[in-house]
Amino acid sequence: MTQTIAVIRGDGIGPEIMDATLQVLDSLDVGLDYEFVEAGTGALESQGELLPQATLESIRKHKVALKSPLMTPVGGGFSSINVQLRRIFDLYANVRPAISFPNTKSRYSNIDMITVRENTEGAYRSEGQTLSEDGEIAKSEIQVTRKGSERIARYAYELAKSTGRKKVTIVHKANIIKTASGLFLETARRVAEEYPEIETQEMIVDNACMQLVMRPEQFDVVVTTNLFGDIMSDLCAGLVGGLGLAPGANIGEEAAIFEAVHGSAPDIAGKGLANPCALLLAAAQMLDHLGKQDKAERLRAAIIATLEAKDSLTPDLGGSGTTSSFAAAIAKRVAA
Ligand code: ATP
Ligand code: MG
């Protein structure tokens, strides 16, 4: 039976990069059907809602969504759609691969790592943030749970196992944030014991940042709490050449949403200038998630070969190609 996924074409450059991505997936013959649903400013205009019920139902039903960037209107008290989706589906794992690609503006050529960030607790709960009435004292509570730590650690080790990765680095600050970071570390250690075939390394977050900048090739899978993961995953994106090549996934037990890290870039929308690579790499992550690792590998290899050949690259990569000519060049290589 063919699996169906929910597809959100999104706002700004969203529709262009989604069309390009689906064109490549067709050439790769991934055996997926698509249910197209709306979200974002497009949905607000056509259906009067930023996040229509039918969209939520489609994600709930198919459990997997490929999503282009969405625009949340400024003002009007709208809360971010991405944050809403994370809450509604309890998407606890934010998974961001960082791979060095040829012919990109990156400092290193040997990075191949994935950051697994806990996405629901830590320093990010709005409930724990207060300001005294006189405005002189701000407090921010960090809440870490054993359950939350266990499921993120398990996700990281299972990801390492299923994608043939060898090492997991647990990043923490348990020497200073003794209870919250300590509970995370202790729980992750316990999960690590169940995976003796995978090497476990522990690293304090400040050292991890220095190591990332000096010797990033030593990292394979990194697992950490919300705030550290937020900072480290952007650091990693920067190390491999920035937004146009950075994919991400938000994963929960009921659903998983795969997307580009960049936004809707309205300044270049509709001009055929957008680089589709970040969404294509998100699609590769999705194929891994669906157990189609061979297709995911072929897709990544085709992207690398196209970059290497400098074939039809978009202007952000120094080429003079367009979104669709770049996608066609990648499609040609996945089919080969
Ligand atoms: P949003 O408000 O949705 O975040 P944005 O314009 O801030 O939209 P960002 O992703 O933050 O979008 O991008 C910043 C700039 O980087 C864009 O204005 C655009 O010029 C460039 N950019 C982002 N994504 C791409 C892409 N896929 N291809 C080419 N350029 C991009
Ligand atoms: Mg932005």
Image: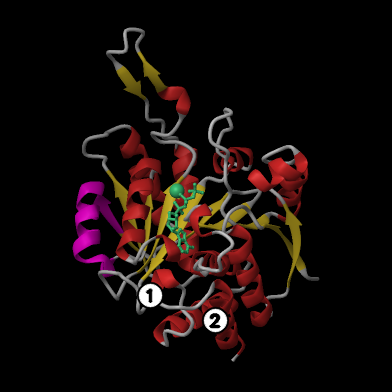
Would you name the residue on which mark 1 appears? 318
Magenta region, residue range: 201-218
Answer yes or no: is residue 89 visible: yes
Would you name the residue on which mark 2 appears? 330
What residue type is disc 1 on? Gly
**231 and 332: which is toward the camera:** 332
Residue 283 pos. (x, y %) = 58, 67
Asked if residue 267 is positioned above or below residue 118 in the image, the reply reads: below
Q: Which of marks 2 and 1 is in front?
A: 1
Report helix, strand or loop for mark 1: loop
Asked if residue 209 is positioned above or below residue 34 in the image, the reply reads: above
**114 and 77: which is toward the camera:** 77
Answer yes or no: is residue 40 visible: no
Quick one: label 2 or label 1, which is nearer the N terminus?
A: 1
What residue type is disc 2 on? Ile
Residue 80 pos. (x, y %) = 55, 38
Name the residue at 62% across, 87% down: 335
